[in-house]
Amino acid sequence: MSSPVWEKMLDSTGVRVTVSNCTVEQTTENYWETADQSEAPCQIMALHAGEDAPVFHFDVPKTQIDVTFAMPVDGGYALYTNALPVEQVDMIPTENEDGTTDYRFDTIYNFVITVKDGERSDRFLLICSRKGYHE
């Protein structure tokens, strides 16, 4: 794995996350929990990853991480509920011996990543692209 290009202690859970194997730009995006945008949007941290398949390292076990698709909509992104990401196709999780987890994201798409720690959770958006292409 290459050196980290982005690192953060997540606000609510305090979980350390690092990203490598790509370039990263951090922004804030509007996000809706449902595809029909029936409720008010919330602001969500977005990481724009380009050039290669991003690798995320989480200092927690895989059981504390949820990954779902998000689709672009007018003014932001909405949760895509018609399909779930497929392991070994869209992403490859690796549970490490030290209790940490790595995820390599292979699909050029948008993912909402939720990290849980008991009652607390952090959520952010990953927007993947390759060499100027983005779906």
Image (spheres, rainbow, N blue to C red):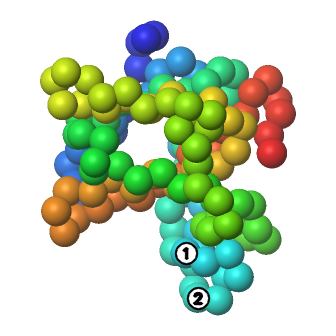
Label 1, on which residue? 33
Left or right side of 41 for 51: right
Label 2, on which residue? 39
The reply to whether residue 49 is in sight is no
Which quadrant holds the C terminus?
A: top right
Q: What element carries label 1?
A: loop
Mark 2 closeness class: few <14, some 14–19, many ≥20 residues within 10 Å = few
Mark 1 closeness class: few <14, some 14–19, many ≥20 residues within 10 Å = some
Residue in view at x 43 percent, y 32 percent: 93
The reply to whether residue 128 is in sight is yes
Residue in view at x 62 percent, y 34 percent: 89
Residue in view at x 65 percent, y 49 percent: 110
Disc 2 marks a residue whose amino acid type is: Glu
Q: Where residue 69 sits: x, y (%)?
A: 61, 55
Q: Where residue 65 sits: x, y (%)?
A: 35, 49
Q: Where residue 99 sits: x, y (%)?
A: 18, 31
